[in-house]
C-alpha cells in the first residue's frame, strides 16, 4: 500500500524518515564513524567534502576520518583543494624530508599558503592534522608513509619556479630552454589573471605553445643514468608542476570567455592530478594506492545530480565515479546555521560571519527538522527499493558557501538544486557549526559580525 503522504510537501515528514535512517553521533569516534569506515574499506578514493571553506566542524571531522582511514584502512595520501607547490612543502615536512626552507613545525610548513584565502589551509585544525601526520610517519619506511598533495591549478608562477629549480639541479641545459620558454609569462608580472585577460582577447601573444612544449620535453627527458630511488618523488613533483603550468595557462585564458569551460578545465585538472598521484604511488608501493580527497561539496558531489550538471558543468565527483565506479566514495557535509570564516569579496580580509538558518525548501532544513544535532546518513547500500532514496532523489535546494559569503543575497548566491541521494554516497550533518580559526586572526575576525535582529530588524 502506497504512503498517502508526500514528504516533498512537508519537510517534517521527510525528516522523520531521515531521523529513522540516521546514525546519530555520540562523541565516541569509534561509534560515530564505524559505518563510514565500513563503506570506505573497498574504496581507493574517499572524497570528503565541505559545505563551506570556513567551518571548523567540517575541517575537524575530515581530519578525524582521515586519520582513521590512514591508520586503520591503509590509505596512502591526502589530496587537497590546494596548489601543488604549497602542498609539496607540507608533504616534505610530514615525510621528514629536507627542504630549502628548513621547516621545523607545521606552522612553518604551511607558510607557503600566502594567497587569498589563506585560512583555508592556515588554520588551527590543519596545523594539528599536519603535526599528527608527521608523527604518524616518523620511523616508517618511505613506502609506508602517508603524503600530503595539492590538486588545484592556481600556482602558475610558483610552479614555473619549481620546474626551473628542479631542472637546474639535474640538467642545466634543459633549465636554460625552459627559462626561455617560460619567459613568455613575464610580460604580465606575477598576475596570471592579467595574462589570461590579455591572451583571451588577443591583446598579447598566447604562451600556450611554450607551456605545452616544455611539458612534452619534460616528459621525454632522458638522463644518462636513471635517477636514484630517492629522487623519484622529486621528478614526479617537477613533472606535475610542468603539467600544472600548461593547464593553468589554458585555464586563465578560458576564464574570461566561459565560466563553464574554465570550471570544467579546473576540475579535469584536479582529476588528472589524482589519477597521476594514484599511478605514482601504486608504482612505488607495488599495489593499488588509496587516497583521501578534501575539497568543497561542489567539486566532490556528482555534478550530474545537480543544477550545475544541467548547465553543462562537470566536476571531480562525476569524473571519479565514471573512472573508478564503486571504488570511489563521495561524502558530503552540511550545516543548518552557525558561524563561518569568509570574506565579503575576493581578496578581502577574513571575517567571522553568521550563517543564516537554512531556507525552508532545502535539504539542510529537512536535516534540522530531525532534531538531531549531529548524524551520518549513509545512502550507498540502502537497496534500490528504499523509499528514502527516492525521496532524496527529488530536487531540493542545497547550500554552498565558498570563501565569500553574502547573506544579503542568500538564495541567489548560495543555493542550487540537487538530488542528494544521487549526488553523494553518504552525508554528514552538523546542525550548528562554528567558524574555523585562522592562524592570522585579525581584530575584525575576533570581533565577529554585528548581531542582527533577524528577521524583524528590531
Image (spheres, helix red, strand yellow):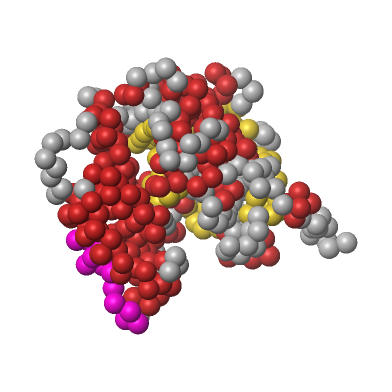
Q: Position of residue 98 (x, y in %)?
A: 41, 33
Q: Position of residue 12 (x, y in %)?
A: 64, 43
The part of the image, by quadrant, that contains residue 231 is top left
Q: Which residues are magenta?
A: 202-213
- Residue at far right of view: 458
Which quadrant of the figure has residue 122? top right
Q: Is residue 5 left or right of residue 171?
A: right
User: Does residue 438 appear to the left or right of 101 in the view shown?
Assistant: right
The spot of residue 436 in percent (x, y) is 64, 43
Towards the viewer: 132 or 35: 132
Q: Nearer the viewer, residue 248 or 55?
A: 248
Residue shown at the point (45%, 20%) measured from the top left = 138
In the image, is residue 36 part of the stretch drawn in magenta? no
Split into 4 quadrants, where in the image is the C terminus?
bottom right
Residue 282 seen in the figure: yes
Q: Number of numbered discs present?
A: 0
Q: Is residue 179 above or below residue 236?
A: below
* Residue sitting at the far front: 172
Asked whether the viewer can see residue 200, the reply is no
Classify 222 as above or below 93: below
Q: Residue at x 21, y 60 (%)?
A: 177
**Residue in the image at 55% along x and 39% along y:** 108
**Residue 107 horizontal/vertical position (percent):** 57, 38
Nearer-the-camera pick, 446 or 332: 446
394 or 405: nearer the viewer? 405
State left or right for residue 10 relative to residue 252.
right
| Residue pictured at 62% horizontal, 38% vertical | 124
Amino acid at each position: 500500500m502506497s504512503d498517502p503522504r508526500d514528504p516533498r510537501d512537508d519537510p517534517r515528514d521527510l525528516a522523520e524518515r531521515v531521523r529513522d535512517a540516521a546514525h546519530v553521533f555520540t562523541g565516541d569516534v569509534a561509534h560515530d564513524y564505524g559505518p563510514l569506515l565500513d563503506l570506505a574499506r573497498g574504496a581507493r578514493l574517499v572524497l570528503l567534502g565541505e559545505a563551506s571553506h570556513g567551518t571548523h566542524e567540517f575541517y575537524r571531522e575530515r581530519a578525524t576520518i582521515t586519520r582513521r582511514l590512514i591508520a586503520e584502512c591503509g590509505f596512502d595520501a591526502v589530496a587537497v583543494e590546494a596548489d601543488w607547490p604549497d602542498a609539496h612543502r607540507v608533504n616534505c615536512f610530514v615525510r621528514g624530508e629536507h627542504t630549502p626552507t628548513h621547516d621545523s613545525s607545521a606552522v612553518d610548513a604551511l607558510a607557503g599558503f600566502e594567497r587569498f584565502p589563506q585560512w583555508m589551509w592556515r588554520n588551527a585544525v590543519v596545523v594539528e592534522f599536519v603535526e599528527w601526520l608527521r608523527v604518524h610517519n616518523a620511523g616508517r619506511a618511505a613506502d609506508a608513509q602517508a603524503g600530503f598533495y595539492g590538486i588545484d591549478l592556481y600556482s602558475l608562477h610558483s610552479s614555473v619556479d619549481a620546474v626551473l629549480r628542479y631542472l637546474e639541479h639535474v640538467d642545466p641545459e634543459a633549465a636554460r630552454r625552459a627559462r626561455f620558454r617560460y619567459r613568455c609569462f613575464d610580460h604580465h608580472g606575477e598576475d596570471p589573471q592579467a595574462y589570461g585577460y590579455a591572451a583571451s582577447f588577443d591583446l598579447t601573444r598566447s604562451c600556450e605553445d611554450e607551456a605545452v612544449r616544455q611539458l612534452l620535453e619534460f616528459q621525454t627527458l632522458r638522463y644518462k643514468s636513471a635517477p636514484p630511488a630517492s629522487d623519484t618523488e622529486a621528478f614526479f613533483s617537477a613533472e606535475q608542476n610542468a603539467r600544472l603550468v600548461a593547464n593553468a595557462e589554458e585555464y586563465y585564458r578560458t576564464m574570461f570567455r566561459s565560466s563553464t569551460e574554465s570550471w570544467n578545465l579546473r576540475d579535469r585538472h584536479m582529476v588528472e592530478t589524482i589519477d597521476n598521484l594514484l599511478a605514482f604511488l601504486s608504482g612505488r608501493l607495488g599495489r593499488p594506492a588509496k587516497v583521501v580527497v578534501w575539497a568543497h561539496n561542489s567539486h566532490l558531489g556528482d555534478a550530474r545530480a545537480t543544477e550545475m550538471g544541467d548547465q553543462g558543468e562537470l566536476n571531480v565527483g562525476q569524473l571519479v565515479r565514471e573512472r573508478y565506479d564503486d571504488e570511489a566514495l563521495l561524502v558530503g557535509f552540511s550545516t543548518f546555521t552557525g558561524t563561518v570564516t569568509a570574506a565579503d569579496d575576493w581578496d578581502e580580509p577574513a571575517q567571522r560571519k553568521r550563517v543564516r538558518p537554512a531556507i525552508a525548501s532545502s535539504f539542510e532544513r529537512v536535516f534540522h527538522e530531525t532534531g538531531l544535532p549531529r548524524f551520518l546518513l549513509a545512502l550507498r547500500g540502502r537497496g534500490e527499493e528504499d523509499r528514502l532514496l527516492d525521496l532524496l532523489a527529488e530536487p531540493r535546494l542545497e547550500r554552498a558557501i565558498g570563501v565569500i559569503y553574502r547573506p544579503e543575497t542568500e538564495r541567489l548566491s548560495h543555493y542550487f538544486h540537487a538530488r542528494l541521494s544521487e549526488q553523494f554516497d553518504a552525508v554528514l550533518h552538523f546542525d550548528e557549526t562554528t567558524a574555523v580559526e585562522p592562524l592570522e586572526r585579525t581584530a575584525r575576525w575576533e570581533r565577529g559580525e554585528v548581531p542582527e535582529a533577524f528577521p524583524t530588524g528590531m
